[in-house]
Image (cartoon, grey):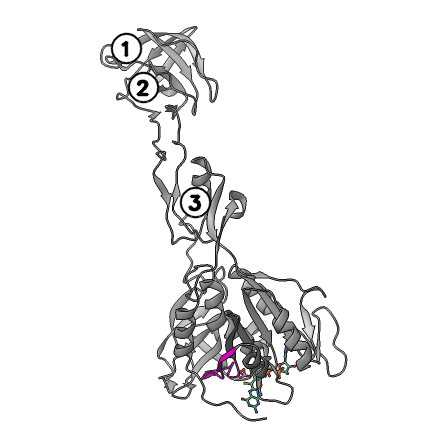
Amino acid sequence: MKGFGRLTAVAELIQLLDQSTYPLRTESVPLERAVGRRLASPVIAQANVPGFRRAAMDGFAVRSQDIALAGTAGDAVLHIVDESFPNRPATRPLQAGQAIRIMTGAPVPDSADTVVMVEMTCQENDEVHILEAPPLGKNVSGIGEDVAAGSTILEPPRTLRPQDVAVAAAAGLGSLAVYCQPRVAMLVTGNELVNAGQFPSAFQIVDTNSIILRTLVERDGGIVLASEQGSPRILPDDPEVLREALRTCDADCLFVSGGTSVGKEDHAPRLLAELGDLIVHGIAMKPARPMGYGKIDGRPVFLMPGNPVACLAAYDLIARRTVRHLQGMPTHLPYPTSRRRLAQPIASQVGRFDYVRAKLNEAGEVYPLLMGGASILSSTAKADGFLLVPADVESLAEGCEVVFHHYDAQEEPNTIEDIPI
Ligand SMILES: Nc1nc2c(c(=O)[nH]1)N[C@H]1C(S)=C(S)[C@@H](COP(=O)(O)OP(=O)(O)OC[C@H]3O[C@@H](n4cnc5c(N)ncnc54)[C@H](O)[C@@H]3O)O[C@H]1N2
Ligand code: MOO
């Protein structure tokens, strides 16, 4: 057992991750699986939208010269000769003095140039009185008015929204090229651990890191691999078992939870160094000091501290970036922020980066809960969010302005505005 060597600064580790991780391969996915994925190449419209001249209103398709004087010199009276419905066009061409009854979305006959809304007309048997003449071309959507075939409709970088995929579908595409989602393996170590849902007997601890890691990795677009033994797989603190699991693991990114520190059963750093590169072990951050990072066969491996709050902070601030990088996603923190006053001073240390769980008091000020106590998981449930103390800051005075990160987007009235009704 010996302590850490040099602690790596958070900024240095982040720079290292950002510079050494690249998006994985790309794949083509059907539209129904494309929302939320990162677009890998430009999307070119295959079809015009609409592909035909389309009525924008229910009314009458007319020739503008037949109704030019309507409204000024009495009504223009036209003979209704046919009807046009969506996907059921009129079959007769329009002659002088004639109109075709038309529905919204239906094809406008070539012989018509304008659609008069039904509200501007008056019908009598098979005649229609046009009470007012709209301008030429009114209520006729031209071919390609929405999307022109051959035009670029979506360009990377972009995370696909429902409406993006809908536009691609309208323009005739059936699939889109996106970056692959990283397949993430989770190796959870600890002789004392039992699966969530089990009641812990004496000296047992429920594995909560899996819940945190799984949901956050999935939030960030990763696919958590199920182990053969069921997911999550809890490994004993046995170096042979962990070595084998690390050696045979087929994933784009690996997480090892627990056993990262310098205790007798903390094997992960040594095994990572043996099977690949242990690039960082020990970071200048509180919590999550024992965090490690390295590579096996070029694939990133994160050693996540066993203490659950440390695991949460190490994921959100650091490992998350790689999960996002692997699919070409932006890496900024995913929480809404607001600038607020600090209700109590915070003592930190120059050279150390702090993740401080905090509550908002009734005055909307930030009340720090805990900076240490990485085993006190309930503090994260009590907290409304967190603030970060950069490494070059020794302390934060009461009353100073801080950036507060809200865990919940929905519940924060200051950063989310409802519709103005
Ligand atoms: N001499 C030193 N001891 C420790 C140091 C240090 O710098 N020098 N760092 C401390 C810090 S900080 C942390 S964090 C922990 C991290 O230790 P490990 O990553 O080796 O984690 P374990 O020892 O396996 O477990 C620590 C703690 O967390 C509980 N745990 C583990 N896995 C889970 C899980 N999946 N779900 C819930 N809880 C988990 C475990 O039962 C322990 O109580 O090391 C300190 N020691
Ligand atoms: O990082 Mo440890 O994470 O402080 O308990």
At 74% across and 71% down in the image, what residue appears? 198
Left or right: 72 as drawn, with respect to 275:
left
Q: Residue 66 carries which label?
A: 1
* Precedes in sequence: disc 2 or disc 3: 2
Residue 383 visible in the shown view: no
Q: Height in image: 129 above or below 391? A: above
The magenta stretch spans which residues? 277-291
Quarter-of-image position of residue 398: bottom left
Ligand 1 under 8 Å from disc 2 Cβ: no
Left or right: 407 as drawn, with respect to 98:
right
Mark 3, residue position: 164
Mark 2 residue type: Thr
Mark 3 residue type: Asp
Mark 1 residue type: Asp
Instruction: Give the residue furthest to the bottom.
Output: 2
At 56% across and 82% down in the image, what residue appears? 269
* Precedes in sequence: disc 2 or disc 1: 1
Disc nearest the viewer among 2 and 3: 3
Instruction: Give the residue furthest to the right.
Output: 201
As helix, strand or loop, the secondary structure at mark 1 comes to helix
In depth, the one of 226 and 413 nearer the eye is 226
Mark 2, residue position: 114
In percent of width and height, residue 383 lies at 52, 73
Q: Height in image: 165 above or below 231? A: above
As helix, strand or loop, the secondary structure at mark 2 comes to strand
* Precedes in sequence: disc 3 or disc 1: 1
Q: For label 3, count other residues whose C-alpha is less than 10 Å away and answer few (under 14), some (14-19) or many (20+).
A: some
Disc nearest the viewer among 3 and 1: 3
Q: For label 1, count other residues whose C-alpha is less than 10 Å away and answer few (under 14), some (14-19) or many (20+).
A: some
